[in-house]
Structure formats: C-alpha cells, structure tokens
Image (cartoon, coloured by chain):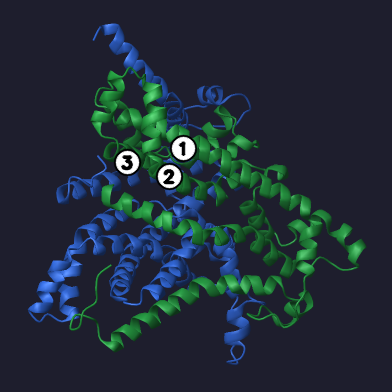
Amino acid sequence: MKVSYRGNAISQTANTAIHAIFIVIGLSCVVPLLLVIAVSFSDEQTIAANGYRFLPEKLSLDAYRYLWQEGRTILNAYAVTIFTTVVGTILSLAVISTFAYPLTRKDFSYRKLFLFLVVFTLLFNGGLVPWYLVTTQVLHLKNNIWALIVPHLFNGWYVMIMKTYFQTTIPDPVLESAKIDGAGEFRTFLTIVLPLSLPGLATIGLFSAIVFWNDWWLPLMLITNDKLLNMQYLMYKALSFADYLSNASGQNYGSIMQLSPPALTFRMALAVVGIGPIVLAYPFFQKYFVQGLTVGAVKG
Amino acid sequence: MTRLARLYKNGALLVMTLPGLALLLALHYLPIGGILIAFKNYSLSGGSFFRNFANSPWIGFDNFEFFLNTPDAFIITRNTILYNLVFIFLGTAISVFLAVAFNELRNRRMAKIYQTTILLPYFLSWIAVSYLFFGFLSADKGILNQLVFEPLGREGVDWYNRSVYWPYILVFANVWKYAGYNCIIYLAAIIGIDNDYYEAAALDGASKWQQIRYITIPSLSTVITLLVLLGIGRMFFADFGLFYQVPMNSGAIFDVTNVIDTFVYRALINSGDIGMSSAASTFQAFVGFILVVLSNWIVKRIDSEKAIF
C-alpha cells in the first residue's frame, strides 16, 4: 500500500468526512440484515401490534420453533440448494475448463470457429421465449433436478476468463516439453494444465458456486414441484404468498401449540436461515473473490 | 507429423470441447433458431417442439404489430432505457467517488471493514434484498411507517401500491447492491497508477484535490469509458430480479416497475401468450444486439484490446 507522507495527505476534515460517508453506507448495508434478525427473534403479538423494531421488545423463539416443525420442507430445500451448488460447480468447472483450454492452443484447427461461437453468445441470444421453449420442450428440463443445474453450466464470460488465465499462466515451452516427453493431450491437461491453473479454477468455481447458491431464477422458470424448491425459491414463496407455509401444515402446528403460526416473525426466521450461510461464509471467501475480480479486470 | 497424427491430436482437443459444445448449441444456438417462433402463430398443441413448430402457420409480423400496439410496449421500453441510463451514470459517478475516497483512507483496518460491508449486498440474492426492503417498506409493520412517519405525526405510506416512490427506490436498490462491486473495479485501476506521479505532483506543490483532478480521474477515464459503454450495450436488458422481486410483483406500480424482461416473463408464464412474449423478447434481442455492436465498435476505437470482438 502507498505510504502516507506529510504534505501529501488529505486534510483532517476531508478524512473525517470520508470516514463518515463510509460509515453511513456501511450501516445501510448491515442494518437491514440486523432488522431481519431482530424481527425473527421477536414475539409475534408484539410485532403484530407495534410493527418491526431494531431491538425486539419481547424476545421469543416461537418463529424458530415453528421453523423446526417445518423442518422437513426446509431441510429438503437446503438439500436441493447444496446438491445443485456442489454438483453444478464441479460440472461447470469441468465444462468451462475443457472448453477454454483448446481455445488457447494455436494448433487447434477449430480454435477460431469455437471462439466465435462463444463470443457471439455474449453479444446475441434468442431471448427468453425460445430459450424457455427449447429448455422445457426439447431438453425436457422441467421439474427435475437437472433443470436447476444444466442451464447454468456453460457461461461464455467464464470461458473467456479461463482462456485468458490459461494463456497467461501456462508457458508454451511447458506444453512443448510435455509433448516431447510423450504425454497425450488429456494427460497434459490433467497433470500439467489444471494443477498450474488452480487459482484460476478456484476463482471461477467461487463465482459459479455463488450463482448456484443464490439462484431463484431457474426454479421460478422451470420448477412447479414443491419437492424441488431450493432455499431461495422457498424464501420467495414465503414472502410473496404470506400463507404459503402456514397452509402446508398450520393445522398440525395449531394442534400442538394451540396457536396460529407466527407468520410475521416466521418469515424473517426463514430469511435468517436462508441468507445466513452466505453471510457467514462471506468473510472467508471475500478475499479470493476480490483477488479474482481484480485479476480479471487487469488481464481481462 | 503425419496427417493421421495431426487428426488424432486435433481429435483429442475436439473431444475435450464436446460437453461445452453440446451445451452451447443446445442452450444458445437452438434458441437463436427459435426466434422464428415470433413470426409464427405458435401453439402448444402437445407433442414435440419441432412438430409444434412445423404445424404452426407463418404470420409474418403480426405478433410484432400486436405487441407494438399495446400501451405496454412504450412503457416497458421507456422504463428499461431510462432506468438503465440512470443506473449507468449515477452508479458510475458514485462508484468512482467511493473508489477515490477509499484510496485516501489511511486507516487500513477501517478501510478493510468498509470494504467488507459495502461489498456485502452484492452477494445477496434479489430475494434476500426483497426481504430487507420489506422490513422497511411494509405498509403496516415497516420501519419507515412505524418509526419515521408515525412519530412525525404523518400518515404512513402504502409503499407497494404507490408508483411515485418506486423510481427512487429502484435506483437506490440498484446502486446499493452494486456500488461496492464497481468500487473495487475502479480501486484496482487506481492502485495500478504509478505512485511517482503523485510524488512529483506533491513536490511541485499540487494539492490533494489537484492530484485527484489531474492524475487519478484522467487515469481512470479509460476504465470508466469502457464500463459505461458496456452498460450502454446492455441498455435494452433489465435486471429481472430488481424489477420483479424488490417491488414484490405488485400490480399497482407496474407503470414504473414493468420493464421488457418482466413483461416478457408475465406474458409467457402468467398469460401463456407466446405470440406477445416472443415478439417482445425478439424485439429486445435485436435492438439489444444493435446497441452491443455499436458500443463495442466504439470500445474498439478507444482500446482495441478491450473490445469483445
């Protein structure tokens, strides 16, 4: 980082103003999350009477108790999210790296054609309707788990980033010597190219894991079967259709607790459970994300 | 190298590309061919896609005429373009300002905390964001009505049913979610500026403001231009999540929240109107393509390295 020296630092007033600005913006990013957490731990009746508060007027775990009752729905949504994220990220890395690597090889005869095929998709696409009809009617990606994975596997931007990464990190002489040593293409790719490109793969893997984890678009388009809802889509349904979950087993809950489901606080508890993992993981992956972003910006 | 050996070598690389190629053709190129649907009276009469396609009669530009004659066509085009323009210019100005300001922070630990917090919204899905906004905007429980308007003795606002506020809310939501991300891109460019310039300027008695005005901003101009042009190329496409999830699909405010992408979605999924939705989505694809090509052409003239083609 740059060294600060006398005479070239900003004034104390400017410094204070900058800190103030960042504190206000920083709070605007964190406080809404704290509000959701506070409401989720509040007593339903108090919220119903007084509205949301940053500090719970009366603490209650009812929302989470109800969440526990709904365990099966939520665990199922979690399982769908985790499965699609893990399988999707691995498959997507495989598809992107195997497609990007030949594009870096000057001796690959179809290089120009394939490169054009990728770049063209970045400029033009058929639009939502043909995509939807092809996806559901030709590929039959509707109401099955692959509908939540396959459409996100190939990403032209990631192919371009990965291609640049291969080009800048793998020197041609390395590939030459592997060839002289008699290694075939697959062996060279698996034992030399991939191990040398781990940081690049990690970056693309992180980007695509976030895409899969946060995805609600594919279920919105392609899933109507409740068993295949992921966490994001469950959150969407709980917010858009206030009684979506209470209808499902509200009677059951009522008979045990002699209460109607705590709809207001329950929703926020669901949001806490849904948003929680990415917020908790965020401090750990942030550094790699920023590095990947700036590497892409410099080299891209 | 013999002919056979060359074929074998290409063959191995070709085999490697097959999974990607299959996905590319099935998910990108088949739908491009599917654009022809917009010129047909396509009906979902059961059976396969290709049979439906073959059985649907050609109707020329009827779908487009029908679409362009709806009042929605003007509203969604206007909304899509105007929102994008505001996002591009306001978003860029704010991100550049934040990056320049951030670079002046000398307290590294605080800087780290600021960076972490302002980048956080980028990782939240629009669904998560819609919950956060709901906490503030809910008419009967939200913070704004409960803790701001009521204590001031003013009547609460039915936020999700009042159009006037939504242009501001949507612009705020967009800037709030992406400012941290863009700030980092600009910051990377600022850090790349040679420190010698600043030292020389300081020796010559240039103030901090002059250094920012005459060194930092000019050094950023290429990156800014490129990102603005990239934004202009995407001006006909809207962020579906922002316009669908944050207003919670509320019909009363469609006049200011409906964009091409949400219109196409509703026409397709809610109304099942393939003619209308395919006309709108094809209209978007073509005008969008022209904008992309145009902006890329300009990028190429500025810095041919950064052009996508």
CB within 8 Å, label 2 to label 1? yes
Q: Is residue A143 left or right of residue A193?
A: right
Q: Which residue type carries mark 3?
A: Tyr
Q: What residue type is labelled 1?
A: Leu
- The mark nearer the N terminus, 3 or 2, is 3
Instruction: For label 1, count other residues whose C-alpha is less than 10 Å away and answer few (under 14), some (14-19) or many (20+).
Output: many
Residue underneath mark 2: A204
Identify the image quadrant of residue B12: top left
> Could you tell which of marks 1 and 3 lies nearer the N-terminus?
1
Q: Can residue B243 be seen in this view?
A: no
In three-dimensional space, the C-alpha distance between marks 2 and 1, rounded to whole angstroms, equals 7 Å
Q: SS at mark 1?
A: helix
Indicate the secondary structure of the residue bearing disc 3. Answer: helix
Judge if badges 1 and 3 mark residues of a common chain. Answer: yes
Q: Which amino acid does label 2 sit on?
A: Ile
- What tint does the image give chain B? blue
Please state the total of marks drawn on the protein image.
3
Q: Mark 3 lies on which chain?
A: A
Residue under label 1, please give it. A93
Counting from the top left corner in percent of width and height, residue A165 is at 32, 41
Q: How crowded is mark 3: few (under 14 residues within 10 Å), some or many (20 or more)?
A: many
Q: Which of A14 and B46 is in front in this view?
A: A14
Q: Which chain can be seen in green? A: A
Quadrant that contains the C terminus of chain B: top left
Q: Dot 2 falls on which chain?
A: A
Residue in the picture at 91% in, 67% down: A258
Q: Compared to A225, does B120 lie above or below?
A: below
Q: Is residue B37 left or right of residue A112?
A: right
